[in-house]
Image (cartoon, grey):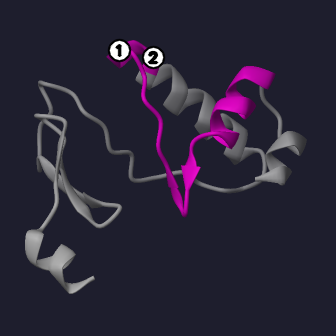
Amino acid sequence: MQNLSRMNGTTEIIQKLKNSFYMDNCVRSLPEYNALNLFIEQATKVFEGVKFKLRGWEYTYPELEGPANTAIFGTSWDKKEDTLVVDKVSLEMV
């Protein structure tokens, strides 16, 4: 993430990106849908400058269309309800 400081973009978006990565996922909580769209737009522009295409955006939104569940951090995330489900059997194996 040190290379982010050399990318084109505002200091604010660069700092948000630096603090939002976990493995190869960018995880960020935003207050509302318009802020989400702005973040996606700004982050995409930052990474386009170094020829890195961001894709596969996942987010919580009550009117979400399409699949509601996605795997994240070894759990199942219900994006419509914004809840995480942990498989008890998987935990017992650890």
Q: Residue 76 placed where, x, y %?
A: 18, 58
Mark 2, other Cα within 10 Å: few <14 / some 14–19 / many ≥20: few
Residue denoted by label 1: 32
Residue 51 appears at what percent x and percent y? Answer: 72, 56
Q: What residue lies at 74% left-to-right and 33% top-to-bottom?
A: 14
The reply, left or right, for residue 70 in relation to residue 29 is: left
Left or right of 71: which side holds 14? right
Q: Where are the magenta residues, as a range?
A: 11-35
Q: Which residue is mark 2?
A: 35
Mark 1 neighbour class, 10 Å CA radius: few under 14, some 14 to 19, many 20 or more: few
Does residue 48 appear anywhere in the picture? yes
| Three-letter residue code for mark 1 | Glu
Cβ–Cβ under 8 Å for marks 2 and 1: yes
The residue at the point 12 percent across, 35 percent down is: 80
Q: Which residue is painted at 11% across and 45% down in the image? A: 66
Q: Position of residue 15 (x, y in %)?
A: 72, 31
Q: Is residue 50 above or below residue 59?
A: below
Q: Position of residue 53 (x, y in %)?
A: 59, 54
Query: Is 37 rendered above or below residue 26?
Result: above
Q: Secondary structure at mark 2?
A: helix
